[in-house]
Amino acid sequence: MNELIRLLSYMICIAAFLGLNLAYLGWVERKGAGHIQRRTGPKDVGPYGLLQPLADGLKLMSKQLIVPANADRPLYMCAPILTMVPAVLLFVAIPFGEHLVPREFNFGLLMMFAFASVGGMSILIGGWGSGNKYSLIAGARAVSQNVAYEIPMLITAITIVMITGSMDLNEIVRQQGGFFWNWNVFRLDKSILMPVSFLVFFICSLAETNRTPFDMGECEGELVAGYHTEYGGMGFGLFMMAEYANLVIGCSLTTVLFLGGWQCPFGLFPGPHWFLLKMYFLIWCFVWIRWTYPRTTFWGLLNLSWKYLIPFSLVNLLLTALFIKVF
Amino acid sequence: MNPSLFSPEGLAGVIFLILIGVTMIGAIIATCTKRLIRSVSGLAVCFVGVAGLYYFLNSPFVAMMELLIYVGAVCVTIAFAIMLAEPDEAKLARKMSGLSGGLAAVCGGAVSFALGYAAVNGQWMAPATQVNDGSLKMIGASLLTKYSMVFELISIVLLAAIIGSVALARAGRRGN
Amino acid sequence: MMLTLSTQLNTYLIIGAILFGFGIFGLVRRPSLIGMLIAVELVLSGASVNFMAFNRFLAPDPTVGQIITLFIMAIAAAEAAISLSIVIAVYRNYKSIEVEDLVELKG
């Protein structure tokens, strides 16, 4: 019974955390975009525009949900929900603090990647269900990008698993205790290319969550709005929320694997505050990169993955194995 | 003995029944709809159900791999192929009604009844001892020591599949 | 009894048999190549469930069933990839993916 109450309270807390984040990450993005582009972002609704997400939510909820005539109705209706479900589900395994993890799975890392690939299928369903050939092309592009960048991500994660000896996310964080040079990004005794593999993982997270410079799936200039062209009102809202939820998951995973999760850089007071600090720093980097770099071309994007990142990560894997065996 | 509904075993039983339902609904959607893309979605739902069944069978690793490989890769590949090889929906719908429905039901029913009968009435003997506990660590150890041949064979099969697919795709493109 | 179904072997064997039956049903019913591929995936799933059930309840070495299931998954993925390449190549030549239209053997 105790366990049930614990799980229920975690579910409520995760729902609250997620809801707050999804709403206010949009605000952070727009303010950041504004200031990077030398203007202020939203500032009318509430002080500093802080009530803007509420206004946006109300607007989206009050719009009519138009279903296009030759859309496949069950698929069209299910796609936003199916995109949201894996993103929310993954919060169960993320260690916010030493004992602040809803459920400790000893295959936590594998779970992250499994549900991320399920998310790829739902993009395809959304693109097809719209009955619009531009949405379909955009959906196919987004999925091929997703699949291409999953591979270096998986291989780099295998490197971390080899170093740690466990797929449990909390265990990976525990082994990065002590000072900040114990964090996996700085552990050059395990592989000389570790900071570069952190960079590879970061780039793959950018591509997996469909953020610029890799947002072929939703670029406005070319394909109207990509695979969520035909969605209005709350369907679009759900797609946007799923994108931000994937963003939070991607940044949390990068923090846990490479930057030491809830460990303090000086070994003093480990706790969830360090985790949140590092995660929000990475999210800020994502926003910064989005409004600084132009978009890549589609073949440039796929070339980057298949021709550069995958061979590099394979070499890194062999190098890590060599280092672990020899040193 | 019967566990009560709100104990952990009872709730696990309820979730198991839901998973069986999801698997069956997915299989029904996969075989009975006229449109191929709905069929693939039903297949994906069925695989999610089967992954849940694997979780109940004490192997979460295989459950996650099922989600990763089947739903994330195989279903996506089939959906891509459906997009590239546009099926003629009207022709498919016409073909599927008629006698083939009854014949198919008889075939499928007969096969599953035979298998089920053989399974339920078989005398399966439990082994005396368990060699290891089947955890993830043991799978890794087995794959690299006792069953390393299987491991290498899988990689050769996948390599052959990749080379074959790329060769087929390139030949078509150069022909056009 | 309904709530303890997950701890009995027969449940899983019957589920495997039913999935196999659905696969055969789909295979006979569907006139297009991709539809048949989907049914074949169901057949393979049924066989995998059967292997895993025996692995859990009756196997002396519980890693063997899981390794076999991973093997089946890899084979199914490779098979799906190759057969979909063949389907696309066939579609380029015949402009259709129904089995009734694929009647010529080049001779």
Image: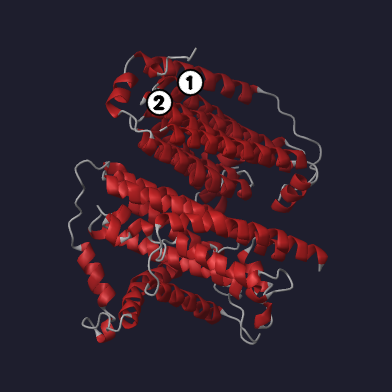
Q: In this view, does B168 lie above or below A131?
A: above
* Left or right position of A249 against C68: left
Which quarter of the rendering shows the C terminus of chain B?
Answer: top left
* Separation of marks 2 and 1 at Cα, in angstroms: 33 Å
Residue B30, x across and y down, in percent: 41, 33
Amino acid under disc 1: Gly
Q: Is mark 1 on a helix, strand or loop?
A: helix
* Left or right position of A204 against A82: right
Q: Can you see residue B89?
A: yes
Q: To which residue does mark 2 refer? A: C93
Q: Which chain is indicated by disc 1?
A: B
Q: What is the number of callouts on the image? A: 2
Amino acid under disc 2: Asn
Residue A188, x across and y down, in percent: 70, 74
Most foreground residue, C57 or B96: B96
Pointer 2 local density, CA inside 10 Å: few below 14, some 14–19, many at least 20: few
Identified at 66% across, 64% down, the residue is A160
Q: Which chain is indicated by disc 2?
A: C
* Left or right position of B23 against A74: right
Q: Is mark 2 on a helix, strand or loop?
A: helix
Q: To which residue does mark 1 refer? A: B108
Residue A129, x across and y down, in percent: 30, 44
Q: Nearer the viewer, mark 2 or mark 1?
A: 2
The image quadrant that residue C96 belongs to is top left
Q: In this view, does A227 lie above or below C53?
A: below
Identified at 32% across, 15% down, the residue is B98
Q: Is residue A326 above or below residue B61?
A: below
Identified at 27% across, 80% down, the residue is A41
